[in-house]
Amino acid sequence: MIDALFEGLLLVLQWKAFAFMLLGVGVGFWVGLLPGLGGVTTLALMLPFIYAMTPIEGFAFLLGMHSVVATTGDITSVLFGIPGEGTTAATILDGHAMAKKGEAGRALGAALASSLVGALVGAFALAVAIPIVRPLVLSFGSPELFMVAIVGIAFIASLSAEGGRGMLRGFLAGGLGLMVATVGQDPQAGIARFTFDSLYLWNGLDLVPVLIGIFAIPELIDLALRGTSIAGDVPKGQLNKGALEGVKDTFRHFGLTLRCSLIGTFIGIMPGLGGAVAQWLAYGHAAQSARTAEERAGFGKGDVRGVLGPGAANNSKEGGALIPTVAFGVPGSSSMAILLGGFFLLGLVPGPDMLTTHLAVTFSMVWTIVLANIITVVACFLFLNHLAKLTVVRGSLLIPVILVLVFVGSYTANNDYGDVLLMLFFGVVGYLMVAGGWPRAPFVLGLVLGKIVENNLYISVARYEAEWLTRPIVLVLAALAVAVMFYPLLQARRSAARGG
Amino acid sequence: MRHPLALGALLLGLAVVPQTGAAQSAPYEGKTITIVVGFKAGGGYDRTARILARHLPKYLAGKPNVIVQNMPGANSITAANHVYAVAKPDGLTIGTFNRNLVLAQLTNVPGVKYDMTKFAWIGSAASETTVLAIRSDLPFKSFDELRKSGKPLVIGATGPGANTYDFPLLLKEFLGVNFKIVSGYSSSADIMLAIERKEVDARAGSYTSLRPFIDRNLVHPVIRARAVEAGIEQLPVDENLAPNARAKAIMALRSAPEVIGRPYVMTPGTPDALLKLVREAFAAALKDPELVAEATKAKMELEYTSGEDTLKILTEVLSQPKDVVDEFSKYIKFGE
Amino acid sequence: MERLASRILGVAVMFASGAAVVIAMDWPLKAKLFPIAIGVPVFCMAAAEVLWGLLRPDARAAAMDFRLSDHLPSKIAVRRTLVAIGWMLGFLVGIVLVGFPMAVPLVVFLYAKVQGREPWGLSLGLALVVWGLFYAVFDRLLHLPFPAGWIQTWLGVA
């Protein structure tokens, strides 16, 4: 295996492959940055261009592009509060809040550095886990996936707001998300649910316009409200704490960054959970690391840990998602589905062979992810502090640009005006939630996981009848769900007893 | 969307250039043809369209620019409606969409605004037959063995409307095989993983999508639908095993669109001369050696079915007697 | 503001989940099970939240989320919020009337000049840059379809 490791590295370092990787990184950089340029769509658009390349070159290009998208998506999230990709929404909560406090440079530095750590951990995990990957993935069936989704929602719902009433609101938001996810045609009876005879709603609600609406619109209104630049009251020209501080934060909280990377890798390995989940679970975990209720209340208002968690998880999940794609031919995320097309184009057959006879190619993919991320992060750091200066540009100049990005970003999801209206509708919802103190994170997670919860439940019952409840991993996860719900209550009682 | 100034200049230019009548040498000179795809980028329909977009210009006099636009929505009903009623019949818009849209029309799905037979049919770029593939470590080597044993087989499916669900459903209802259809998997790839996990035993799907797994020997096909593809000619056909004429008609109805695996149309009212040019270009492009090489690399099997043949099939589908359609609707719903 | 927004949301969710459960009743079992199983608890929780708000309006429930800036006197805050919403709706109307590609530079220019009172040069420049990038990426490069606005259709130049 060690020689495959080195062989893989040498394959990537051939100058042609390396050049294509750089090209991919260049394209991916802008794709992640601009809302409206989806990573998945662009990957699909790039597929035809790799016909002429050799497998290693083709992969260097595609993976180089793909690895970078999650990293630069964090930049728009931090600076403007617009999710550059569906997977970078969680970074908005604390990242943009930090930008508003004048700490944009620090937030960007933290996001990038944690992304790098995440990518490295994900790649490392991919390499190390290769012997155990098949049994690991095969032991997580539909019942286990259902329970993981439940644990995730319970986790986020219970800690996203403080106190008993806060927990109620958290579960309310989560339940609402699950309900909204049922819009569309159901996979059991084929009924068009809650579509009111509209063709637009037939396939259900697209995540991207909803995310843009629920996160970007309230921020935009708030910006107009304040009448200042994003960084608000900070004296002009003095953005305290630059990017380097953010890097230091990553290492100050290295344990957290590492754990969130592992969470991301794990979620990535589980095909069927989707890419948007990892960031929220990591965010929840980061919030949980707050020791007192007051500290926890600081999340969502500019705690750097809220940036480190999602930043790391986002990138590590891609390394994780490569595993089911490579080892089983089953894509671990929608971008992996496109990459799979690339596999076939380049003449590779995903399956057990990729972990044995073609191990070097697999490792070359791992190295590509590693190198592409390192290059991106280094390149970004060169002008991070300049990017941060965008947060002191006057609101009156920035707002129209953000407005355009928001509208275009929602439209290009499906080339449908309906999405723009959907975005505005959820903009209203998001605004009301922020104004009313309802947490948005559980809603988003409910929406993302709704179909997974419902479908896996049906599959579990249909396939195993009642005995799925007694499977060992299911029982462990059920206990975890209960624990996760009571933990914040315990914590509150403990700190109250301590005299808080 | 053209920039207004450029469009204004073009209109002026066209008005000034004398029209020489129907026999223009290069009607597509300087124009752009748009292929509207009813699905998101990256899927089978989209990739087929993009390959065609790259090679079609060689075979159209005037070498026009051919671009692809995605209009996903309502399983491509939106795109079909658009090409049917909104796009202009000027030969500059081509549409490709879900092959099962004719069934949506047949079963009166609300929102359908098109009539399949009225489109200006270019033809189909491939036929996509459905097969049922069972896990290779199971003791059944053929469909007959499976049926005779009476043992229950768990089939994973995505949902009604997809061939993963519909094909086994009809087999179960009419051929008396002991299937348990477990529906709700998010994609056919997830079903493959479930097969490896032994959570399910089999999956139905397009031969193209199952190929990699058949080649890897994870599953092997045991029965197919009527459309033929290279490599599976000798498999039994579901219709041929039907116990009565009604069952056969319903199975045939489900499989009919599969021959028109990748449908390509133009707006109703497109001038015949242009339609003829495009049809010829299509047929030629699909034989182009470069296109064939690309398609093979991408594991796609493209071949031309003519517009006339597709229209025949569609007319036959839409002229089925009401009682057949009613019973069909009981089993098959239009969906993904 | 917080109490009002929370109450509006609570009532809206009660209404929506109640309606959803009622609509779902007519469906076959497999289609209605999940929506009803989630809808009923959501309805109850929303009702509880509304009641809590009425009986104990001061109960703390700070969300782990950002809070709208509340340092401005409420009259100014309301006015500015309404103006911002107005611009968003205006952009939407613009897109419908003149199509995306024309509405983009228009809204950028108008907002900068009229709302922001920026100098002519800066407003025009910004509008031009944004429009240029938009056109280059979304029209030329990606060939995205942007339906014509009503005005263009009416004038016949679409």
Image (spheres, coloured by chain):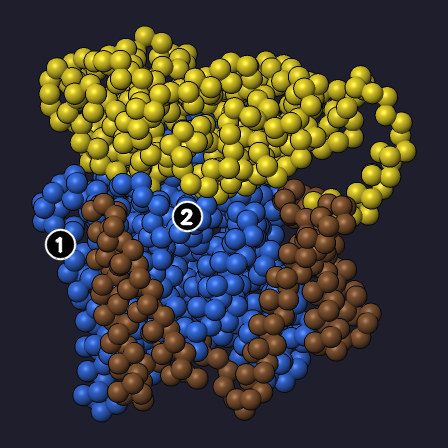
Q: Residue A262 location, x and y as percent? A: 33, 56
Q: Which mark is residue A197?
A: 2
Task: Identify the residue at horizontal 67%, vertical 31% (top origin).
Answer: B89
Mark 1 surroundings within 10 Å by alpha-carbon count, few (fewer than 14), some (14 through 19), many (20 or more): some
Q: Which mark is residue A475?
A: 1
Could you tell me which secondary element the residue under label 1 belongs to?
helix
Asked if residue B147 lies left or right of residue A117, the reply is: left
For the colour blue, the matching chain is: A
Residue sitting farthest toward the front: B322
Q: Is residue B296 visible?
A: no
Q: Colour of chain B?
A: yellow
What is the chain letter for disc 2? A
Q: Is residue C110 above or below residue B213?
A: below
A92 or C106, which is in the foreground? C106
The answer to which quarter of the image holds residue B245 is top left
Asked if residue C66 lies left or right of residue A130, the reply is: right
Image quadrant holding the C terminus of chain B, namely top left
Asked if residue C128 lies left or right of residue B240, the reply is: right
Q: Is residue C51 above or below residue B165?
A: below
Q: Amino acid at mark 1?
A: Leu
A43 or B188, which is in the foreground? B188
